[in-house]
Amino acid sequence: MGIKDLLITPVWLGIIYFLAYTLRPVFTDNRIKAYFIPGLSVKVVGALAVGFIYQFYYGGGKPSGDTFNYFKEAQVIFNAFLENPKAGIQLLLANGEVNPEIYEYANRIYWFDAPTEYFVIKLIALFSLFTGHTYTAVATIFAAISFSGIWAMYRSFYKLFPALHKEFAIAMLFVPSVFFWGSGILKDTITLGALGWATWGIVRVFFERKGIVIGALVLFLSLYTIYSIKIYIVLCFLPAAILWVFLANVERIKSVALRILILPFVLVIGGLLGYYAMVKVGEDNNRYSLDKVSETAEITARYLTYMGETQGGSVYTLGDDYDFSPTGMLRKFPLAVNVTLFRPYLWEAHNVVMLLSALESFATLLLTLWVIYQAGVMNLFRYTLARPIIGFCLLFAIAFSFAVGISTYNFGSLVRYKIPMFPFYLAGLFILRYLAQRKVKLKKRPKAVLNP
């Protein structure tokens, strides 16, 4: 970062905020208007803070795919556009193939044949064409695009539960780790925004049932974007989304007896479709095919553990063994979910970054226990069946928590990897709490007195 950032980034900040204030009346009402600009602002602050942390705390970046490494790789494509526009276009469209015209550039890109990393690099290079390859300007664009997806998701949930506008704003816009790690030039920024748009697409197509063509197109492009960067998010998201849609259609049946009769078949069909979706998604990526998932998890866990130990990171364990057989992974399921949702514990924090993460995890634990207490353990399943969106949120959050918890083994990486589940998990808890409180209020309401 240098003088170019000071000259170009304010221009882009002006453009972004001009668009935000212009579009705010279109995408808000009087109740949620107050969250729009602050929600965007914390994303922008998070994007800039990521760069400052890596520049001044980590000393210019660490090995493996951090924000500066992506940015430096994208400069090769940016330079290609300046020297040979045809080669630049070919690099943007390339998918690991090399021809003589781009060889001299591709040979200088370490991740050229790594599809997920190269997808991010191409996005940075594309935005660099409009920013003169300026780090902070590109970062603010990343933040704004990610915010658009999160806001789309927020509006979708708000339409379903208008009374929870404040709670949803907290869950989706103002969780510190989410707006920090989900705003800069990182994979997580893109996948988080795409998840928001995918959720909007599902609500648009299957629940609001208007603008179906646009909604379906946004849903497809969002899932493709996530698939191109972090396929395991799609593997967790699709089954939960499919069951949500199926169970919501059962909810529309007025006859209680018929709903009870049909429900088991819907659960089986939804589960099978979710499994089939996972199989088809995994077929295109050998590492994440169902017969390779355990192997991939073990390789990832061992690598991140090694990196944490050799670089002084905060390593955690889920037992004394690396048993990644199906039964071994199933045995570690509760521990993996727990580590993602509620760890590091306060006494496991050894630096400021981990302390902030520990405080957030502790707050999540307290909220979870409070919601369970208010709703009652026996009522959790009933509320979830009554409102399938709760099942969608919690199923995705728990499946995702298991996926990252079983394969990360490093708190430093986990704090970043787990952010996609936070908006869904917290939203699910807030809806449960709302239903429990409403039930209590209805019980306390005085009964009508019959006329004599």
Image: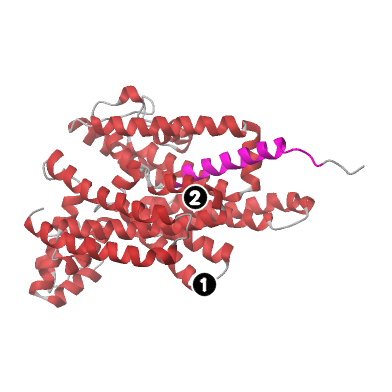
| In the foreground, 49 or 286 | 49
| In the foreground, 125 or 335 | 125
Whole-angstrom CA distance, mark 2 to mark 1, is 24 Å
| Left or right of 317 on screen, residue 14 | left
Along the polypeptide, which appears first: circle 2 or circle 1? 2
Instruction: Give the residue at mark 1.
Output: 211
Is residue 195 at least partly visible in the picture?
Answer: no
Instruction: Give the residue at mark 2.
Output: 165
Residue 86 place in picture, x, y as percent: 15, 77
Residue 325 place in picture, x, y as percent: 43, 37
Residue 109 place in picture, x, y as percent: 14, 59
Bin the neighbour count of mark 2 within 10 Å (Cα to Cα): few under 14, some 14-19, many 20 and up. Answer: some
Q: Which residues are magenta?
A: 423-448
Residue 209: quarter of image? bottom right
Is residue 136 at least partly visible in the picture?
Answer: yes
**Which residue is painted at 25% across and 71% down in the image?**
93
Bin the neighbour count of mark 1 within 10 Å (Cα to Cα): few under 14, some 14-19, many 20 and up. Answer: few
Residue 91: quarter of image? bottom left
| In the foreground, 183 or 261 | 183
Q: How many marks?
A: 2
Residue 19: quarter of image? bottom left
Label 1: state its secondary structure.
loop
Does the segment drawn in magenta span residue 417? no
Does the segment drawn in magenta span residue 428? yes
Q: In the image, what residue type sits under mark 2?
A: His
Q: Is residue 273 above or below residue 423?
A: below
**Which residue is painted at 32% across and 29% down in the image?**
316
**Which residue is painted at 20% across and 56% down in the image?**
111
Label 2: state its secondary structure.
helix
Q: In the image, what residue type sits under mark 1?
A: Gly
